[in-house]
Image: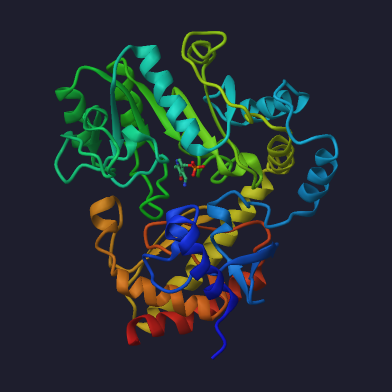
Amino acid sequence: MKRDRSEELFQKAIRLIPGGVNSPVRAFRAVGGTPRFIREAKGALITDVDGRSYIDYVCSWGPMILGHADGETVEALRSAIERGTSYGAPTELEVLIAEEIIDAVPSIEMVRMVNSGTEAVMAAIRLARGVTGRNKIVKFEGCYHGHVDSLLVRAGSGVATLGLPDSPGVPAHLARDTITVPFNDPEALKRAFAEHRDIAAVIVEPVVGNMGCVLPRPGYLDLMRELTRRNGALLIFDEVMTGFRLARGGAQELYGVTPDLTTLGKIIGGGLPVGAYGGSRDIMQYVAPSGPVYQAGTLSGNPLAMTAGLVTLRRLRDPDVYRRLDLAGARLCAGLMEAAREAGVEVTINRAGSMWTVFFTAGPVEDWASAAKSDRGRFARFFHAMLDEGVYLPPSQFEAAFISLAHDDAVLDKTVEAARRAFARAIRD
Ligand code: PMP
């Protein structure tokens, strides 16, 4: 049998690049098999190097909210590239995107652009420590904030456990300053504050995407706000995924809870490498050169990322966008639920707007412990059955899937049809 081109490329890639990929989940380790090497993408579809097209629910892990190769974005980039790709000096575009972000996100009065979500979080943590003069950070089990040393920590069960690093190379003394508590557990958070006086910040994905999609219980984000305020700690919303995804003002707009600092990424770069962090003027004034907390970047605010970001953010001013994305999410997830029921597969589907996950468990899924109850074998079989049907889902149970504005009803209904067969295969194979 002729080996396909993805397979050939992967064999070559694994000799040249660790695991054959430039970011781990792409390697299909959780689901087995060979990752598809992508040649091109347009709208809701991605096409691999063997010419097979898939309805794409990864959307580059969130950024492609307009769909792939959006006409206006491509045109704007084409024109921008003619004027040079990076200057290392300020541009009008950076002022425009700052205005756009500040107008949209309730907590942000000043913003600094960086080049990835990881960088944004790293800078926000440094800033929180610099402003408070404290070191400890509270994070939630199952939340991911990029590969920042001090946040690559997931303590076992138990409350306010002293952290152990998840990755070799993370110094234990850094991990010790990270306190990990279960998500959606008010008592655990209260205990963390009762036991530690020197908490600089609480960092959270306000709607979690990185254990699959998990929503905060009513009042949980308000409790975080109250406890941090009362104890002189800052509240950081990591909205790298949820920013401009759940609403123009992110989860903070949706839930009406205003953090001290917010990190952004993904959508604000329109598919180019980007990140940002922002907050109140008082806090952001601590950042160099206006203040003492250092942070810099050769390519930060580069004209290509700013151009793609600006086109995207301007289109997202239209409130109808979020209504349409929510309707699309509701239509798809109702269809998937019905398909699972018909096939006799027990699933829990969590959804916030256009962000969703099918968990292979009776649920409810509200934290890491309940997400981890999912049948990962079933998920892997479902994933591959969907891939065979021409639907590309995130290749891990513990990731959120995304819908773009290019996913029309026909595409959503085709996905549900595919899922009818795929759910049956998930329990049969
Ligand atoms: N924070 C969150 C909530 C994320 O989802 C991610 C990436 N998935 C990051 C931070 C890191 O962003 P990046 O991969 O751009 O470094």
Residue at the extreme front: 15
- Closer to the camera, 277 or 104? 277
* Point 75% across, 28% down: residue: 93
Residue 372 on image: x %, y %? 26, 59
Horizontal side of 30 relative to 285 (left or right) equals left
Residue at the extreme top: 291
* Point 55% across, 27% down: residue: 106
Residue 105 on image: x %, y %? 57, 30
The answer, for residue 224, to whether it is visible in the render is: yes
- Closer to the camera, 133 or 104? 133
Count of number-bearing discs = 0
Residue 173: image quadrant is top left
Horizontal side of 18 relative to 287 (left or right) equals left
Q: Vertically, is 406 above or below 392?
A: above
* Point 65% across, 27% down: residue: 103
- Closer to the camera, 146 or 406? 146
Q: Vertically, is 178 above or below 325?
A: above
* Point 53% across, 61% down: residue: 330
- Closer to the camera, 288 or 338? 288
User: From the image, which quarter does the N terminus lie in?
Assistant: bottom right
Horizontal side of 221 relative to 15 (left or right) equals left
Q: Vertically, is 316 above or below 39?
A: above
Residue 168: image quadrant is top left
